[in-house]
Amino acid sequence: MQRQSSSKSLFWEEVVVGETVAFGRRPVSKEEIIEFASAFDPQPFHLDEEAARSSLIGRLCASGWHSCAIFMRMIVDGVLSSAAGLGSPGLDEVKWLKPVFPGDELTGRYTCTAKRVLRSRPEVGLCQILFEMLNQNGDVVMTWNAAQLIGLRTPESGR
Amino acid sequence: MQRQSSSKSLFWEEVVVGETVAFGRRPVSKEEIIEFASAFDPQPFHLDEEAARSSLIGRLCASGWHSCAIFMRMIVDGVLSSAAGLGSPGLDEVKWLKPVFPGDELTGRYTCTAKRVLRSRPEVGLCQILFEMLNQNGDVVMTWNAAQLIGLRTPESGR
């Protein structure tokens, strides 16, 4: 089952375990790949096409951390901006499955795999979320298995 | 056992399982926290001190992805710039244990927990690395359990 995310407010109660929601569309330019890498990940294969030819991938590609940063922005714009998001304690897994190249156009989808309410804070829920980033060919280029804190609309509903 | 990273070239053969190596020192400003968040993670508690007061942490703090990007730069400057780094397929875990606040001064350390040579590519090694980021109080603020590809000095040595 897949639906487009809507603009209405999303609380813990509305997160449906097993439902997949699509969001976002974001082109990636060579200039921003090089700009991000220059600031945060200046390895030759993220900076220079010529140097990238002798790398394992053989072409200039985005830093995995740039993919993460771009994806976070897509998630904020497409999901969290209309959700009661409260931050995250971390991720169980980040997989860079395929390179992100200049000119790629990225989309996202998420699936909540489990949810519960914090024992210590009955107004805060924790959702385990599989986030997937895809390119224009439908290849999954990155996955996250992330923990996301989200507010309850009605704290009593989590009991 | 702990040593400072040196400037000599680091290949797979030189990575010592169980040895902890310290690197880097990096102050974090409020301005860059807001700048990164504006681009990649515009949630209120990363953008605005006033809005952050009502968040779970209660103070403006850096996006976890900003911590990752800063840490990657520290790793490139302090470790990978003198190593035969070949990229990474991903991480088994990213933990944001404590917030990173404006004015914090961050340092890093890494410990290789396992290493092997790729069966398919005898010139490429894979190291499992625990990366830890600390603040000026010695608190571990973030950990990564990462896979790092690294070249062999002598491909035969991995057999």
Image: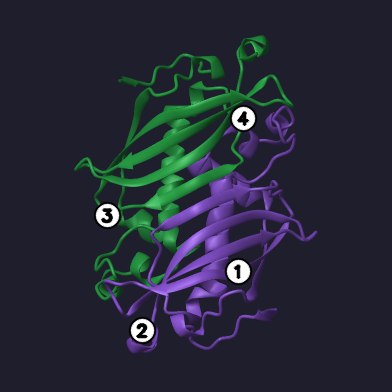
Chain colours: A purple, B green
Q: What is the C-alpha distance between the residues marked 3 and 4?
A: 33 Å
Inspect the image, locate mark 2, and give the three-letter code of the amino acid beneath it.
Arg
Please determine if labels 1 and 4 lie on a single subunit. Answer: no
Residue A56 lies, in percent from the top left, at 70, 31
Residue on which disc 2 sits: A159
- Residue in the picture at 38% in, 59% down: A89
Left or right: residue A60 compared with residue B9 = right
> Is any part of residue B81 visible from this angle?
yes
Q: Quadrant of residue A79?
A: bottom right
Left or right: residue B26 compared with residue A71 = left
Inspect the image, locate mark 1, and give the three-letter code of the amino acid beneath it.
Tyr
Residue on which disc 3 sits: B102
Residue on which disc 4 sits: B86
Answer yes or no: do the residues labelled 3 and 4 have beta carbons within 8 Å?
no
Camera-nearest label, 3 or 1: 1
Camera-nearest label, 4 or 2: 2
Residue on which disc 1 sits: A110
Q: Residues within 10 Å of mark 3 (few under 14, many from 20)?
A: some
Identify the subunit bearing mark 2.
Answer: A
